Amino acid sequence: MKTKTIKAVCLLLALCLLAGAIAGCGAEEEKDLSVTGRAITHELEFGGVYIDLSIDDFNALGFSYGDGVTVTFSNGYKLENVPYYNGYYTQTGEPLLVAYPGYPYIKACINNGDDLWTVAGLGEGDTADISLAEAGAFAAIQNARDIHYKDDRELFASDEVFANFRSVKATGIGENKLFRSASPCDNQHSRAPYVDALIKAAGVGCVLNLSDNDEKIAGYLAKEDYNSPYFRSLYENGGVIPLALNMNFGSADFRKKVADGLIEMIGHEGPYLVHCTEGKDRTGFVCMLLEALCGAGYDEIAEDYMITYDNYYGITKDRDEARYTVILENVLDPMIRSVLGDEKADLRTADLAGAAETLLKNAGMTDAQIATLREKLGA
């Protein structure tokens, strides 16, 4: 009996040692999950740092969306335990490593913030190391925000839904005075011809194009499959105002471009269209600003903003309250707080109209220009 007991104890010890070895190997593998010395380049359009690894190649190393990673640049600048997402899911001003669909490489950046290349003091010849800091650290947000849409018209209920096209309806804004949509000229998502037909039917007289410059627009117009004749006529007759905004809506440059665009816009007769590529984020900010300026409250602004997520993804408060809430709290609310300049303000009681007016004044608009803007958008 004693011999059997000793053998059992020995077997148990052996199993424990084996389990420990296996666990130790796993921990070591996680600890050693890293890549070093990768070349970097400056991503100029939105600001950030491309790291010389394709999304597929990086994921093949074992990294997963929602992981916490540490990015260390060769000049010593470090991003410690930042999220790795397949979209821009961090709060405004927070850093991340992003694998946005269509990007040639993974990218380190500050979401809607200053250019990381400049902030980190990077230059030609610098490199980056990436290591796993905490597996799955940000998986909950990744899962809530990881949403995608299709570019097939037949999957959507109407041309308006497919084109994310609608009249902005809010306190102080007249019926069919202000429209928002996806792009009527950039057809990468197959929506431009639908938007074009809708803005023609609505009699849009001026377009505030938030995503493009003249060079990009010329490229769209030159494509063989270009099929937005109404937009072309507006553009050729000076009715399109290209601003080429990034998404750093807290920056002075962003706000000055918006103010300059609105000054030019009120020199034209409406109705007006505001758009970017998808009609979602940059369009969402500018429409929020105009709605607030004209007297809309938080609930009206939120309702209009979230129509986009219903149009593209079928997300509503009734169907998917968890995702609906995460989007409001992580996307729209930071936009409004940036206008207020107060991270702790009650968004339902704050003076949104006053804050919007102050922002536009600080960005270069006069009292008279703001009054004209309100008048042209009003009933």
Image (spheres, grey):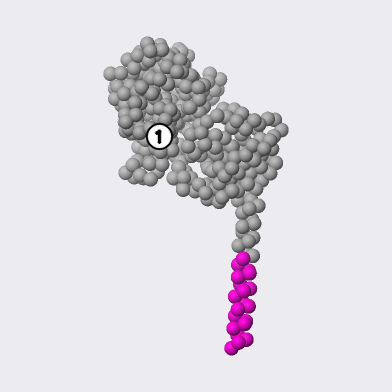
Q: Give coordinates of residue 8: x percent, y percent.
A: 59, 80
The quadrant the C terminus occupies is: top left
Number of other residues with Cα within 10 Å of mark 1, as a class: few under 14, some 14 to 19, many 20 or more: few
Question: Which amino acid is tagged 1?
Answer: Lys
Q: Is residue 17 magenta?
A: yes
Q: Which residue is mark 1?
A: 344
Residue 21 visible in image: yes
Q: Nearer the viewer, residue 97 or 9?
A: 9
Horizontal placement of 164 versus 8: left or right?
Answer: left
Secondary structure state at the residue bearing disc 1: loop
Q: Is residue 157 magenta?
A: no
At 37% from the left and 38% from the top, the residue drawn is 310
Q: Which residues are magenta?
A: 1-20
Q: Nearer the viewer, residue 366 or 177?
A: 366
Q: Residue furthest bottom?
A: 1
**Quarter of the view holding residue 205:** top left
Q: Nearer the viewer, residue 274 or 365?
A: 365
At 50% from the left and 29% from the top, the residue drawn is 247
At 54% from the left and 37% from the top, the residue drawn is 95
**Quarter of the view holding residue 13:** bottom right
The quadrant the N terminus occupies is: bottom right
